[in-house]
Amino acid sequence: MSTVAARIHAHKRQIVLAHGGGGQMTDELVRDLMLPRLTNDALARLGDAAVLDVGGVQLAFTTDSSVVHPLEFPGGDIGRLAISGAVNDLAVCGAEARWISLGLILEEGLSTEVLRRVVDSIAATAAEAGVEVATGDTKVVARGQADGLYVNTSGIGVVRPGLRLGFEFVQPGDVVLLSGTIADHGMAVMLQREDQSALRSQLESDVAPINRLIRLLIEAAPDVRFMRDPTRGGLAGVLADLAERTGFRVEVDEELIPMRKATLYACEMLGIDPLDVANEGKVLAVVPPEQAEAAVEAMRSHERGREAAAIGRIGEERDGVCVLTTDVGGQRVIQKPYGEQLPRIC
Amino acid sequence: MSTLRQRMSALLAVLNAEADRLDRPVNLMEVCGTHTVAACRSGIHALMPNNVRLLSGPGCPVCVTAQRYIDALVRLGARADVTLATYGDMVRVAGEGGSLELARSNGADVRVVTSTIEAVDIAQREPQRQVVFAAVGFETTAPASAACVLEAQRRGLTNFAILPCHKLVIPAMRTLLDDPQTRIDGFLCPGHVSVVIGSAVYDEIVARYNRPCVVGGFEALQMMESVLALVRQLVAMQGGARARNENLYPQVVRAQGNPHARALIDRVFAPGDSAWRALGVMEDSGLDLREEFADFDAFRRFGIVLGDDREPPGCRCGEVITGRCEPNDCKLFGTVCTPIYPVGPCMVSSEGACQAWFKYRRARMKISAPRREEVTA
Amino acid sequence: MCLAIPARVERVEDTAAWVRLGDAQVRVQLDMTPQAGVGDWVLVHAGFAIQQLDEDDVRAIWESLGELDAARLNEGATP
């Protein structure tokens, strides 16, 4: 084996943190290790949720694991994250979330006070989203074998009839919409970590169930072509996917992407690209141009969509890349992040 | 249009007119990884006049750090008693024995810090651990490494050391210009390095090699102003003028630099020979810990002897950072060597010329102006 | 990360200081700017203040950065 091949092989031999980052490394793991062993029609689409036909009714089915550290952070906690994750994954597939399952993995020694707060938050978030926790499971592992608490949620929802959502429906001229500011969740959590004690900011996570906002969006733009919540992998991950999977060029304007100054500064300080950072209460949607304005208005009428904006369009070229026009008018290609966010210094 | 875009297009009008007066295509090199990233992030390559090329030089600390040093770090990380503290930049760069990312996955205790003092704090908090800070970077980070050694001494810590691998900018620029194959017409000098070492140090380069040097800031507009200053000088040189050393960032960069920062470096380090990736060993191009601080030298504490480097076959990073070829001239680029499985160091670092190319410039950028009226619908 | 934005010192603790950058507070070492005190402006890099700036420098930097909402920064920077 050549030296080069040997090096690459070494990198493929074991799991690294980046495999869980929702970026290129995650994609590769799914493509090379999961799909060949598990493939079926429902899974092969790799949507945020699987859409299943059950006796003529279209059901959406999704699962999501939350492993955030710390468990509680400004704007939310692991419980709110777990419920929102499942609800939003169903919503972007055009489904109304109905039932959620709750799997808890607890580490020996976890404070029951913390657990009570997290479960209260789960209950409150479920009520906010209009879903029920219909089944659950609890396991405890020895101290040191988990980081306090992990939560897995699965969700089932009913797909709204008449929607045609998917990469294959996206057409040149369609408008790319975003429901609000980016990078708030990822940066808020990052700044809470012990190793970031040198940076204090008032950032709050955007974590929230946005199924109601998405319902307003769909009502205003019934021909919406595609939706995705830009969680791990950030806006960059979704835009790069959109370009690659549709085969069209996606043209985005940096000036139109909503962003809080405080979040931008935190990103600048740590040398992190805000486009790569996770969001937990946002949706990116592609809609036909004649419905774009109404869709933006509809999102803005919701408290979680006040800063909604059209950020770009689907171009004519068929090169499958996303091109960002920068604040000074330059241009660059947006790529899916690698997987682990590392502060850059030098 | 935003003020920024208006200002950039006004600047470009001047730059294009000036570039039209050049009698040949010119190559300008930015000698700073941050300039490379800023240029790629703001997409200014797409705005350059056709006859002005911006090359990425050896300014990325990751890219110029020899494999043998990475291998030493990975070996250190394998020791059960050692905690490695590193800037995030170094985590993914691979030596022959893998990267710190893989080492961590194998159980090494690798902590990413954003300040050298955090590494000292870890040593104080965890006295049972041997904490080693990977001291990389140019003159901007060298004073921070010096300060952390002094701080560890002040706190009386015996479980803290650094593995020094700092590099000096001027020897690298000299080496580039001494190479007859290098085609560099002017330098966009590093802003923050110059904050420390001062702008006067480029006088020597300008005088000896007759190449213009311009110190500039990091924002896209500031970089473009530096490009304009370089092009103006090159046009003037066509008429017989000599190259000049210009400082466009005088609010921050003084002629003599920051005396406190320089004093910190001199207090703790002495210039020494250093191995650069792809450039080889250069005399007095790095910084060794002074004898007085030998107790903080991880090389000595752990008896580390650096081996040799074997560059990966086919990798042209050396030519890329010396401006002899562009990333996409390399056969490995984008095929075998990608940001996800980087072969050469320039693909590892987000500041590396190859990753910057891959990430920001991969597509052939002939893009129509965005139709903003539709976009803002 | 190299940051071109000036920060204002709000509180000094021994050889370190808390500086304000927009909405954020950042702890930096003053080893390279030992004369900087509360109210002074510094340039920050990798957890260190690497240069002290006077008011004229700061104004010139904001001017050259153009877009960066200087008024707002100023507001955030003044306690």
Image (cartoon, grey):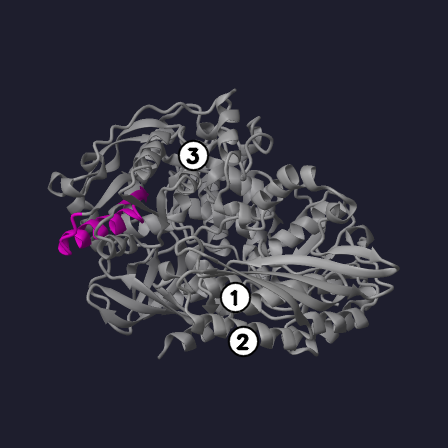
- Give the residue at mark 2: A120
**Marks 1, 3: nearer the viewer:** 1
Vertical arrangement, residue A66 with respect to residue B130, above or below:
below
How far is mark 2 from mark 1, CA to CA? 11 Å
Say which residue appears at 40% left-offset and 23% top-offset: B310
Q: Does residue B183 appear in this view?
A: yes
SS for callout 3: loop
Q: Is residue B146 left or right of residue A194?
A: left
Same chain? Circles 1 and 3: no
Say which residue appears at 59% left-offset and 44% top-offset: A24
Q: Is residue C5 left or right of residue B152?
A: right
Report the chain holding disc 2: A
Q: Are marks 3 and 2 in contact (CB under 8 Å)?
A: no
Q: Does residue A328 appear in this view?
A: no
Vertical arrangement, residue A282 with respect to residue A144, above or below:
below
Which contiguous range is marked in magenta? Answer: B132-158
Residue ranking furthest to the left:
B292
Same chain? Circles 3 and 2: no
Few, some or many residues within 10 Å of mark 2 (<14, 14–19, 20+): some
**Marks 2, 1: nearer the viewer:** 2
Q: Quadrant of the C terminus of chain B?
A: bottom right
Q: Amino acid at mark 3?
A: Ala
Give the image quarter of residue A206: bottom right
Report the chain holding disc 1: A
Say which residue appears at 75% left-offset and 60% top-offset: A60
How far is mark 3 from mark 2, CA to CA? 46 Å
- Give the residue at mark 3: B94
Give the image quarter of residue C43: bottom left
